[in-house]
Image (cartoon, rainbow, N blue to C red):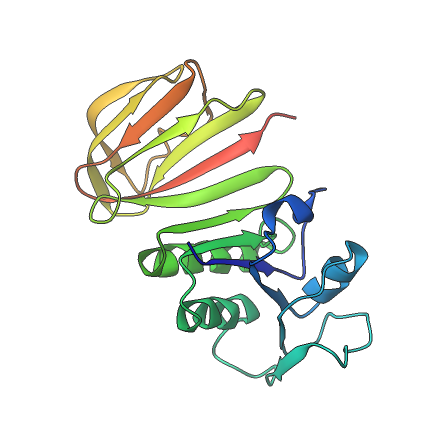
């Protein structure tokens, strides 16, 4: 499986980014993500963005793609387009959560949009991990228990039908979740694995560490 790792300009909580990178990973840094990569001794394969947040000098030994700040696509969008064109199948986005709310919302929209292009697409920082569950692509997923974490399930479709959650503190069976009522927030792991399935619709799964 071809893996790409995107290091964004903002990672709110501490995370060991090196454990998410394999020797053969295609590493993309967006703008100030290069500062974070350099601090961890990581040399990216590509650095792209409008470079409005980078503090380091632009490297001479890394491929660089510069874009105008006045553009329709965010830096993360450009990085995901690159991951698609590179043939990556498994993509991890480091950061992109927290900080400016508008950026977080935009990044969640990108997670929704690009999920269909990859077999696995995850966005995470040291506190949160999120991904999409699409009935047409996945249908069901088994999540190993994560101690000290909340598990939330949100409908991105107007209605997500046939939602079942098993192995959690609060279980539901063949339920309809709606986009305008967050019934699935702050659930908790109970069994060794929690299984989530949806017959028709798209879900956002968020795993967040408890304070």
Which image quadrant for residue 28?
bottom right
- Residue 58's x, y, as percent? 77, 78
The vertical placement of 18 against 176, above or below, is below
In the rendered image, which quarter contains the N terminus?
bottom left
Residue 159, quarter of picture: top left
The image quarter in which residue 55 lies: bottom right
Q: Position of residue 119 (x, y in %)?
A: 35, 52
- 150 is higher (above) or lower (below) than 43: above
Which residue: 31% across, 57% down? 116
Provide residue 81's location: percent of width, then percent of height. Answer: 44, 71
Residue 12 visible in the current orientation: no
Using the image, determine if residue 121 lies above or below residue 72: above
Residue at x 77% of width, y 77% of height: 59
Q: Residue furthest front?
A: 23
Q: Is residue 56 left or right of residue 65?
A: right
Q: Which residue is found at the position 34% from the left and 61% from the top?
A: 117
Q: Is residue 174 left or right of residue 5?
A: left
The quarter in which the C terminus is drawn is top right
In this view, the residue in front, 63 or 30, is 63
Q: Please state the horizontal and vertical placement of residue 203, each as a whole percent of the image.
A: 32, 42
């Amino acid at each position: 499986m071809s893996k790409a790792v995107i290091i964004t300009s903002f990672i709110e909580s501490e995370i060991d980014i090196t454990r998410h990178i394999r020797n053969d990973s295609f590493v993309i840094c967006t703008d100030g993500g290069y500062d974070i990569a350099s601090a961890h001794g990581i040399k990216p394969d590509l650095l792209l963005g409008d470079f409005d947040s980078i503090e380091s000098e632009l490297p001479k030994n890394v491929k660089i793609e510069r874009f105008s700040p006045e553009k329709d696509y965010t830096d993360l969008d450009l990085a995901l387009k690159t991951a698609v064109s590179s043939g990556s199948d498994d993509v991890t986005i480091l950061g992109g959560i927290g900080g400016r709310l508008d950026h977080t919302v935009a990044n969640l929209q990108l997670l929704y949009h690009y999920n269909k292009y990859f077999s696995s697409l995850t966005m995470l920082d040291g506190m949160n991990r999120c991904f999409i569950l699409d009935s047409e692509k996945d249908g069901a997923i088994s999540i190993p228990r994560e101690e000290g974490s909340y598990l939330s399930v949100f409908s991105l479709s107007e209605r997500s039908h046939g939602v079942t959650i098993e192995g959690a503190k609060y279980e539901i069976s063949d339920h309809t979740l709606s986009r305008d009522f967050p019934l699935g927030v702050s659930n908790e792991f109970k069994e060794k694995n929690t299984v989530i399935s949806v017959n028709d619709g798209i879900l956002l799964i968020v795993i967040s560490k408890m304070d």
